[in-house]
Image (spheres, rainbow, N blue to C red):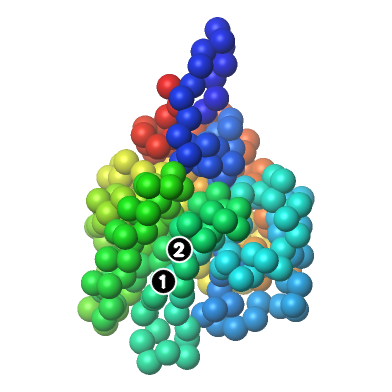
Amino acid sequence: MFDNLGGRRHSLSGKQLRLSRIFAATTRRALVVPIDHSVTVGPLGSSDHADNTAELLARAGADALIVHKGRARTIDPWRFGSLGLIMHLSAGTNLSIDRTGKVLVGSVEECLGLGADAVSVHVNVGSASEPQQLADLGNVATECGRLGVPLLAMMYARGPEIGDDATSVRTLAHLAAIATDLGADLVKLDYAGSPEQMNEVVDSCPLPLLVAGGPVADSDDDAVAFGLEVASSRVAGLSFGRQIFGAEQPHRVAAALAEHLHAGTGPPRSLTSAPTLELA
């Protein structure tokens, strides 16, 4: 990302600079850990669980943490010396009549004031409130463009008409296309089922793709094995939450995944070609 050979000068944008705090300089890959689940399902631990998790992740070599704005205030700011901060703008609960509904609960400007490196928005395509969620994504993308803040779009196929097609290459590529067309900079998707199928999705999208971890694995070894399988594709990284904070030894799982992602010899195609990450 940063090439100073020959004394070359680089023109930086706000998005490029902030993305450099999330993606490793050598591999352009990232282990991003979301702990925004407490709005949806309730407390993830004791009152200081977010601070403890951030401290653990920083030691393990993770690249960024996703958290809601209020929870971010409970984390020691020094945790973010080596850990990127992504603030989540979407919310919905499992107590709602519509469990696939998401609303915006903050602004990009507010997150910048709290020190965020990026923001994220969750969209459930196929839900009853899909039109509003798409509008929210587009509006946040506009605000991110104005302020120079990277936008991670968490795109899922959810709803009564989706059925077994939620993780097909066709559906995941469609979700990535929506995020691209509406102005996101990064996309988080479910896993397509195999590295080969995930590469088909990567090849359809000009943006860096992160893969969601999904439900907690049966064992820590299974969580690591799953992460290594996903990372063997050309995705830009992992967005594993429950696979890490739900593990018996969260530090071990996070460290193993971070080490693997950062041991590569070069960046995946989606990052070398993404215009928001080119510093020429």
Give the Cα separation between the discs numbered 2 and 1. 8 Å
Q: Is residue 56 left or right of residue 64?
A: right
Judge whether 11 appears above or below 53 on screen: above
| Labelled disc at residue 107 | 2
Amino acid type assigned to the residue bearing label 1 in the image: Leu
- Badge 1 density bin: few <14, some 14–19, many ≥20, Cα 10 Å: some
Using a 10 Å C-alpha cutoff, classify the residue at mark 2 as few (fewer than 14 neighbours), some (14 to 19) or many (20 or more): some
- Give the residue at mark 1: 104
Q: Quadrant of residue 277?
A: top left
Nearer the observer, disc 2 or disc 1? 2
Residue 209 numbered tag: none
Label 2 close to label 1 by CB (< 8 Å): yes
Return the x and y of residue 134 as percentages of the image width and height. 28, 66
Is residue 3 something that shows in the picture? yes
Q: Nearer the viewer, residue 265 or 159?
A: 159
Query: Residue at image x 52%, y 61%?
Result: 110
Q: SS for tag 1?
A: strand
Towards the viewer: 174 or 120: 120
Left or right for 42, reference 13: right
